[in-house]
Image (tube, helix red, strand yellow):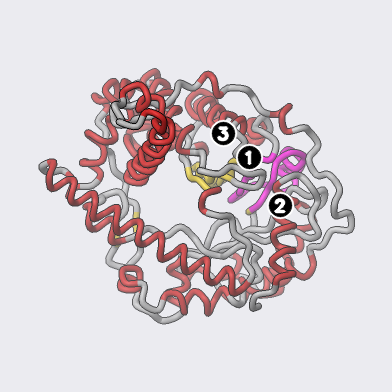
Amino acid sequence: MLYDENLLEERRQILTDVYTGTIPKRVPICVSLGTEVYIEKAGLPLAETQWTGVGLEEAVEDVVKNIRSDTFPGDSPRPPAFSEISGNVFWRMGKNGFMQHPEATFMPVEEYDKFIEAPYDYFIETLIPRMHKKMDTNPERRALVMHMAITALNQFRMNRGMMSGKLSAKYSFFSLPPTQFAFSLNPFDFLSDELRGFTGIMSDIKRNPQKVLDATEALLPILAKFALPRQITNISATFMPCHLPTFLRTSEFEKFFYPTFSKLIHATAEAGQAFTVFCEDDWSRYLDHLQDLPQGTRFQFEYGDPKVIKEKLGKDHIINGLYPVNMLKTHTKQQCIDKAKELIDILAPGGNYYFNFDKSPLSLATTNLDNYYAVVDYVANNAYYDNAGERAFHSKREDTIQKVRHTIPAFQSKYYQSAEDYVANNNYPIQDIVPVVANVIQGYEDQMFNTVMDMV
């Protein structure tokens, strides 16, 4: 459907309603597809197209023009040029053209103390050269490689942003400005994914439990800063994937994962920013814990009983997911539609719900686009409310936020200069504009901070 001002306004309104605790006109639809699906559907070479982008916009448009999502149905692809230039061993393109994340350990257990003492310094001095092999060289060459890699990353993001912006405008998809969006891991997953690896962290919680606890606490100042976008609004959000909890015993979850996870989400909510938490696998054991998170926290569930999830979280939190995307490949069109109806009947009443699949299809071989279109069409046509405008949240937001931000130390590093640092140490010749200069300089410091976090 081509640009329709009324449709765009409807989409903006229903998403604003659901994010702010009002029952919308109809259930919003926020779905996505892996970039690989678009490329394969167009018959383009997978690896080459990811490198060059030639034909990608046409391939994406050929699919999204048929998807009645309220938001642009894209994803967060990994830029191959960035990985190749930097020698990134965390994300590599396989022979099949898919970007893959191999299991890796970048911090030996003997370096816990060094990391805990100054984690951001550790990123710059130790982790980045290990994670990006072509940066493990002399300072001059490292600077050149980092500049090339970041240039490639920024160019990739700019191209994708222009493409999604152009198609969003053409087909009336609602999208948040990039200034209102952020990404952050929780401390425990960060420690596992970026530093110790799955095997390492599972050993550490048995053999070095206090080191793990100290390391997750040490990460909080960094991640609390990283979780805040440049602009916070009542509909902006920070995305957080969480995948280790279901590999933990409940007692381990409560000891190692939940305390800093909860503190990070509450501290971010205290600053005005909501979280979208992707609860990978089955979080049924932890639903009672999630009840204690701030009102308006958004949860995407992969598995679980939708009735129980709605009962426990549907009053003050926003639910999405739970539609098994593999059904699109293995079931008939009518069966797929019937599943959508079943989930809407359970999750839509009372509001605080938007439709989404449990995860994004990652390849053309794993989905059936005709069924995908049919399911989204069904929801768009049949998920209307007869009590739109009523309040959906049951509690006041301020009553659900724990005031914990003051317990998280301010982010500090010898590699980061705040505006206050600049004012205290400057010798700028025009004293009257020192505060202005300090804020401008800190803006660039923050950009560099985000660049470092992108690299880890």
Q: How crowded is mark 1: few (under 14 residues within 10 Å), some or many (20 or more)?
A: some
Looking at marks 2 and 1 on the same chain, the residue that comes earlier in the sequence is marked by 2
Quarter occupied by the N terminus:
bottom right
Residue 359 occupies quadrant = bottom right
Residue 268, numbered circle = 3
Looking at marks 3 and 2 on the same chain, the residue that comes earlier in the sequence is marked by 2
Instruction: Give the left or right position of residue 282, taking residue 222 as reference.
Output: right
Q: Where is residue 403 in the image (x, y as percent from the top left)?
A: 62, 22
Q: Which of 230 and 135 is in front in this view?
A: 230
Looking at marks 3 and 1 on the same chain, the residue that comes earlier in the sequence is marked by 3
Q: Residues within 10 Å of mark 3 (few under 14, many from 20)?
A: many
Quarter occupied by the C terminus:
top left
Q: Residue at x 48, y 64 (%)?
A: 34
Q: Name the residue under label 2.
A: 16
Is 304 within the magenta? yes
Residue 55 occupies quadrant = bottom left
Q: Mark 1 points at which residue?
A: 284
Q: Position of residue 314 (x, y in %)?
A: 75, 43
State which region is magenta. 296-320
Q: How crowded is mark 2: few (under 14 residues within 10 Å), some or many (20 or more)?
A: some
Q: What element carries label 2?
A: helix
Q: Position of residue 431 (x, y in %)?
A: 37, 28
CA separation in Å, label 3 and label 1:
24 Å
Q: Is mark 1 on a helix, strand or loop?
A: helix
Residue sitting at the far left: 138
Q: Residue at x 34, y 52 (%)?
A: 101
> Nearer the viewer's eye, disc 3 or disc 1?
3
